[in-house]
Amino acid sequence: MVGPAGGRPGSGAAPGATRPPEGQRWRRLAAAVAFAALAAAGAVAAGAEDAPHEIKLENGRFSPQQVVVPAGTPLQLRVTNADKAAIEFESFELHRERVVQPGETITVFLPALAPGSYPFFDDFHRDTAEGAIVAQ
């Protein structure tokens, strides 16, 4: 019996279409499952790398003053200003400067860093607030 499109009834197949051999169908299914598993593993690994590191400015001081990060991996740094005045998170070595209003949290996106120390400071209050990101 031929369906409305000329294929088998209810198959949705085009007229004259044939099914791939059984072994080929299983190989395709196995490849699709393997691809999905690799994609899921990549998403989990990327999520671990993307977990932001956090610092907070409170009472004129960054806490922690030193943030240790893995070298060679892009990262995010969340900066929270818990003081009553605006601050400017700045790092010459990282080529970043961002104003952070009181009570605000910002995210600074950084590229993969070479091993080393990258100082940062509050440009509005240079005499007190400073710290460093250490890539190892």
Image (spheres, helix red, strand yellow):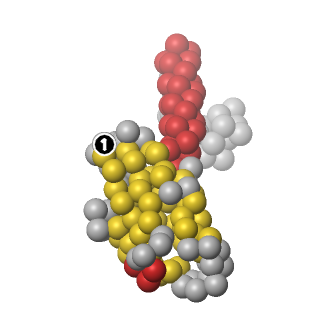
Secondary structure under badge 1?
Answer: loop
Q: Is residue 11 left or right of residue 100?
A: right
**Amino acid type, label 1:** Pro
Q: Is residue 103 visible in this depiction of the protein? A: yes
Q: Nearer the viewer, residue 131 or 72?
A: 131
Q: Is residue 46 left or right of residue 12?
A: left
Q: Residue at x 44, y 66 (%)?
A: 130
Quarter that holds the N terminus: top right
Relative height, residue 33 to residue 115 (above, below)? above
Q: Position of residue 23 (x, y in %)?
A: 52, 13
Q: Is residue 43 visible in this depiction of the protein? A: no
Q: Residue at x 46, y 45 (%)?
A: 68
Q: Quadrant of residue 95?
A: bottom left
Q: Nearer the viewer, residue 75 or 131?
A: 131
Relative height, residue 74 to residue 71 (above, below)? below
Q: Quadrant of residue 122?
A: bottom left
Quarter that holds the C terminus: top left
Q: Position of residue 47 (x, y in %)?
A: 56, 45
Q: Residue at x 60, y 46 (%)?
A: 5
Q: Position of residue 125 (x, y in %)?
A: 45, 80
Q: Nearer the viewer, residue 126 or 72?
A: 126
Q: Residue at x 33, y 50 (%)?
A: 117
- Residue found at the far top of this picture: 23
Q: Which residue is mark 1?
A: 115
Q: Position of residue 2 (x, y in %)?
A: 65, 36
Relative height, residue 45 to residue 89 (above, below)? above
Q: Nearer the viewer, residue 80 or 60?
A: 60
